[in-house]
Image (tube, grey):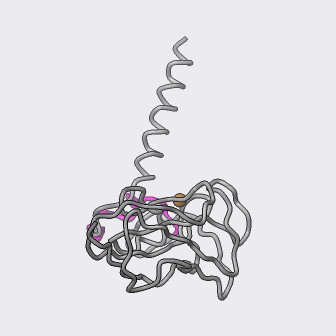
């Protein structure tokens, strides 16, 4: 009985550590004077952050907006169609070479390339492998950008992203 509860306590601790490692570091200042033997084992990033394995993208691979076009004035809901060349779209979780799924970035910057892409109102995942969507946007200017992510939602190496386009949603 004692052994069993110790084991589950260890498991719990391990999963807590793992989930802690899975969250993006929000502290860019890792230049502390900590002793070398306290430094975590990482793949050697200069800032000491954890490096996750990256999927390769082939030369010339690209994603782009089939619609709308940069500068378009549109009505909400906005129909958005994603294009891809040189790679294939697969659902999230499927690890095929030179494949990934689309992410639509709305009114936000490209995220870090070495971490899973955030998932919120500004970073929308199409983990089902879809290549179009319809989104509600309030009237006004909005920026849109596409970024491909691999089976673990991490951008490829090098990252495959579209131009950042600006559209205007008309008043109803
Ligand atoms: Cu994703």
* Quarter occupied by residue 106: bottom left
Residue at x 40%, y 48% (from the top left corner): 20
- Which quadrant of the figure has residue 37? bottom left
Residue 34 part of the magenta segment: yes
Front one among 152 and 164: 164
Residue 51 is situated, as x and y percent measured from the top left of the image, at 50, 66
Residue range (magenta): 30-43
In-image side of 165 versus 34 (left or right): right
Residue visible at 43% across and 39% down in the picture: 16
Quarter of the picture holding the C terminus: bottom left
**Most foreground residue, 127 or 96:** 127
Q: Is residue 22 above or below residue 52?
A: above
Q: Quadrant of the N terminus?
A: top right
Name the spot of residue 10 as percent of width and height, x first: 49, 31
Looking at the picture, tell me which residue is in the foreground, 165 or 112.
165
Q: Residue at x 38, y 56 (%)?
A: 120
Place residue 98 in its image quadrant. Answer: bottom right
Secondary structure character of the magenta stretch overall: loop
Relative to 33, 5 lies left or right: right
State yes or no: residue 108 in magenta: no
- Please, which residue is most extreme toward the front here? 172
């Amino acid at each position: 009985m004692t052994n069993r509860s110790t084991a589950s306590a260890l498991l719990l601790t391990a999963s807590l550590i793992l989930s802690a490692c899975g969250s993006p570091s929000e502290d860019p200042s890792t230049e502390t004077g900590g002793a070398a033997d306290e430094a975590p084992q990482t793949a050697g990033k200069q800032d000491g952050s954890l490096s996750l394995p990256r999927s390769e993208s082939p030369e010339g691979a690209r994603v782009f907006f089939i619609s709308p076009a940069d500068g378009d004035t549109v009505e909400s809901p906005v129909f958005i169609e994603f294009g891809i060349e040189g790679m294939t779209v697969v659902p999230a979780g499927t690890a095929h070479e030179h494949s990934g799924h689309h992410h639509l970035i709305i009114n936000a910057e490209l995220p870090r390339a070495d971490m899973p892409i955030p998932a919120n109102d500004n970073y929308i995942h199409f983990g089902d492998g879809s290549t179009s969507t319809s989104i509600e946007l309030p009237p006004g200017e909005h920026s849109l950008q596409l970024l491909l992510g691999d089976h673990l939602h991490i951008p490829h190496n090098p990252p495959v992203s579209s131009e950042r386009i600006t559209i205007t949603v008309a008043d109803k």
